[in-house]
Amino acid sequence: MTRQIGATLTDGLILPEGPVALPDGSLLVVEVLGGRLTRIAPDGARTIVAELGGGPNGAAIGPDGRCYVCNNGGFGHMVLPDGGLLPLEAPLDTPPGSIQVVDLETGAFETLYSHSDATPFWGPNDIVFDDAGGFWFTDFGRDRGRARMRGALYYARADGSAIREVVSPLDGPNGVGLSPDGKTLYVALTFEGHLISFQLSAPGVIDTAASHMPNGSTIVGRAGPGMYLDSLAVDSAGRICCASPGQGAVLVFLPQGGAPEAVLTGDFLTTNVAFGGPDRRTAYVTLGSSGRVVTIDWDVPGLELAFGG
C-alpha cells in the first residue's frame, strides 16, 4: 500500500522526538534541543508539560500513568542554511544522561535512574514497556572527542528498584520495540543501519540459545548504504516502522526480514513514529530538522502499547 505524508499537526518544535499518543487525542513529544516535554492538542496548540533540561529523547507511559523519559544529557547543534537544525556531538562537559519520570498532571518530575551497576549512562535514547511493568531502554553512547563511548541495552523496573545491563557493548543502539506477542525485542543500530531482534524467554531475559550469535540476536534487515536508523514503532501486523535520518523516511521492515519499504517524509532528520487516533491508524512522525510533527494514514492499526500511549 502506498503511504503518503498528510497534514502537519504542528511546527516550531526544537528537534521533536519520542511521540506518545494519549487517549484524549493529544500527543506528547520531547524537544531534544529544547530540553522539555510538550503536549500537542488535536488542533496543533502546544503546552509545555515539564522543563526537563539536558536532552530528553524517548518517552513512554508507565504502569502508574506517568511519562518515563530517556534523557541523553544534551547535544550540541548547528543551524543549517535552510534554517533547520542538526544535532552535534555533546560538549565534553555534558553531564551523563538519566531516566526521568514526569507527572503529566502537575509537571513534577524526578530522576529514576542515572546509572547501572556497570556504568553511568552516556545517552539514554528510546524506551518500551512490557506487560509485566518493566521497561527496556537503549543507551546510545556518546562521542568524547576522538573517542566513542559505546552504548548498551538495559532492562529496569518502573519503581526504581532494579536495573540490569543486558547487552553490551552496542554501537549506537537507538530505537527499541516489542513484537505483538511480546516475545521478540527489536533494536535499531544507528550507524550500522541494522535492525536486530532478540528472542525473549521471560520479562527482561534474552534467550541466548535462540540464535547462533553470542548475545542471542539476529539481523532482521538493513537500512541500505548511507542510511541510518533512529527510533521505531511496531504496527499490529508486526511490521517494524523505523525512522531513518539521512534518507528522510520511515522504513517499514517485515519481521521475517528483507528490504524495507520506504515512506519518504521530506525531512532528512526523521526521528520517530508513534500510532494514535481513535483506531490507532494515524502514524505521528517527528521531523527533527524542520521541527514538525506530521501524520500518515496507516493501512493497519498501530500496536496497542502495554500501558497506553
Image (cartoon, rainbow, N blue to C red):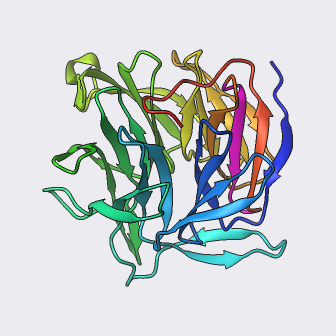
Of residue 34 and residue 78, the one placed in the foreground of this image is 34
Q: Would residue 118 be visible to someone looking at this image?
A: yes
Q: Is 178 drawn above or below residue 293 in the view shown?
A: above
Residue drawn where x is 53% and y is 71% of the image = 35
Q: Residue furthest front?
A: 105
Q: Position of residue 169 (x, y in %)?
A: 28, 50
The reply to whether the magenta stretch includes residue 171 is no
Q: Give x and y (percent) for residue 134.
A: 29, 37
Query: Hey, which residue is sitting farthest left in the picture?
Result: 117
Taking depth in this image into account, of 48 and 208 the one nearest to the observer is 48
Q: Residue at x 69, y 18 (%)?
A: 300
Q: Residue at x 86, y 43 (%)?
A: 7
Q: Position of residue 236 (x, y in %)?
A: 58, 18
* Quarter occupied by residue 214: top left
How many numbered marks have been drawn onto this rendered protein structure?
Answer: 0
* Residue 221 in the image, given as x and y percentages of width and height: 54, 28
- 25 left or right of 196 in image: right
Q: Which residues are magenta?
A: 280-289
Residue at (69, 53) in percent of width and height = 40
Instruction: Say if the magenta span includes residue 288.
Output: yes
Examine the image and state in which quarter residue 20 appears.
Answer: top right
Image quarter of the C terminus: top right
